[in-house]
Each structure stands twice: as C-alpha cells, then as structure tokens.
Image (cartoon, rainbow, N blue to C red):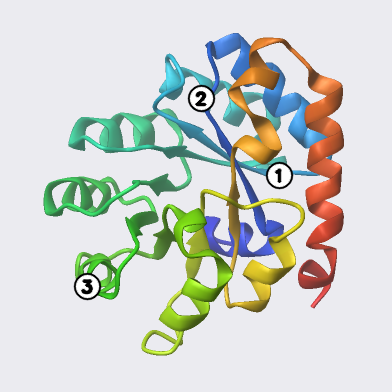
Amino acid sequence: MSALERLRQHVVVAVMRAPSPEAALSGVGALVEGGVRAIEVTYSTPRAPWVIARVREEYGDEVVVGAGTVTAPRQASEAADAGAQFLVSPGTTPTVAEAMRASGTPYALGALTPSEVMLAVELGADLVKLFPGSLGGPGHLRALRGPFPDLPFMPTGGVSVANARAWLDAGAVCLGAGGDLVSTTLLARGDHAEITSRAAAFMSAVAPARGS
C-alpha cells in the first residue's frame, strides 16, 4: 500500500508543531495510543528530519510519517533522506514542487483558490492541501469539487472533531488536524493523556468513513 493510500485509509493526519524533538516523539506515542497512525512532522519542529527518522525506526509500518511546512527545496530532499513517506507544503511554488518531485516522495501542495489548485496539479501534486481550511470551511471544498471532482483534497487548518464528518461529506479524502488534536501547548506541557483522548475522539468521528 502506498503512502497516499495509507493516508486515505487512516483519514486523520496529525499535523505536529512541537517545541522540541523530545516533545515530538512523546507526542507521537500519545497519538498512536489514541489510534492516530498518520503523522506530519512540520519543519517548525526543531530537528524535524531527526524526528522523522526516529519515528520510522521506532514504529516501522505501524505509522506513516511525513514532513510538513516544507517551504525550501533542501527541506524536501533532507526529509526524504530521513525517511519521510510524504511531503507537504503550505503553498505552491515551482522550485519547491520540483524538489519534492525530484525526491521521489509523494507530495501535497497547498492551495486555496481554483487558480492555485490548477497550479498545484500542473506541478504534479499527488494531493492538494486545502489551506487554510478555516477560511471557507467544508462549503468551500464542496464548491471546489465542482470543477475538480476527481482531485484528492486534504483540508488543514480549522479541522476539528465537530466538523470532521462535514469535511469528509464535502469530499475530503483525509484531514490534516493540528491545534485541535495535538497543539504545541499540549506538547510543551507534556499532556499526553489529553492528546491521546483527542486522538481517540477524532478517530471515533471518522470511523464511518474508515469503514466504508
């Protein structure tokens, strides 16, 4: 099963912005305990490639892990070298997209408008990250699905337990969940029980989609 197929299967992709590498690794453990098996380690996390390598080493095929907030070409290559199974950029630029493509790793490019979606597709995106999703909500994704019915979208930003089903009903193939799932604050204070609880709630919310 490819990394993208696994993202579709797991539905919830935890977007992790940790204050330290150690906090990131312990946060991954809390997420896994709650049932979340797809992790996006963002480049706002110190030593993100090292964290990715450790996750691959510790969890193997139990977890699919990628790099997020990829905004520079070198990040694409070093994340792939560390073992990232997918790459995510918050926006779309030719230079970053080319570096992602050259890494041989599946990648998502960020877009909000129809023109940005078209550019992301033109630059070879395997997945379109609808960001920030909070600006238009599920209704915006539903509108984009009109001209782009077959594109796989992953909304990120503003995804919560309360609206997870609405996003999926609007046509999302997976959901990037950050602050409402694994916030920097929770990671900083080491509140693993709360992260695990939120992870379980997210997985319960998307259970019907995972079973379909």
Give residue 115's mark.
3
**Mark 2 sits on what residue?**
53
Q: Secondary structure at mark 1?
A: loop
Q: Nearer the viewer, mark 1 or mark 3?
A: 3
The residues bearing labels 1 and 2 have C-alpha atoms spaced at a distance of 16 Å
Q: Nearer the viewer, mark 3 or mark 2?
A: 3
How far across and how far down the image is residue 122, in percent?
20, 72
Indicate the amino acid at tag 2: Ala
The residues bearing labels 3 and 2 have C-alpha atoms spaced at a distance of 35 Å
How far across and how far down the image is residue 198, in percent?
80, 38
Q: Are marks 3 and 2 in contact (CB under 8 Å)?
A: no
**Mark 1 sits on what residue?**
37
How far across and how far down the image is residue 97, in percent?
21, 52
How far across and how far down the image is residue 44, in percent?
41, 24
Quarter occupied by the C terminus:
bottom right
Foreground residue, 114 or 99?
Answer: 114
Q: In the image, 87: left or right of 77?
A: right
Answer few, some or many: residues within 10 Å of disc 2's Cα (few below 14, many 20 plus, some between 14 and 19). Answer: some
Q: Quadrant of residue 103?
A: top left
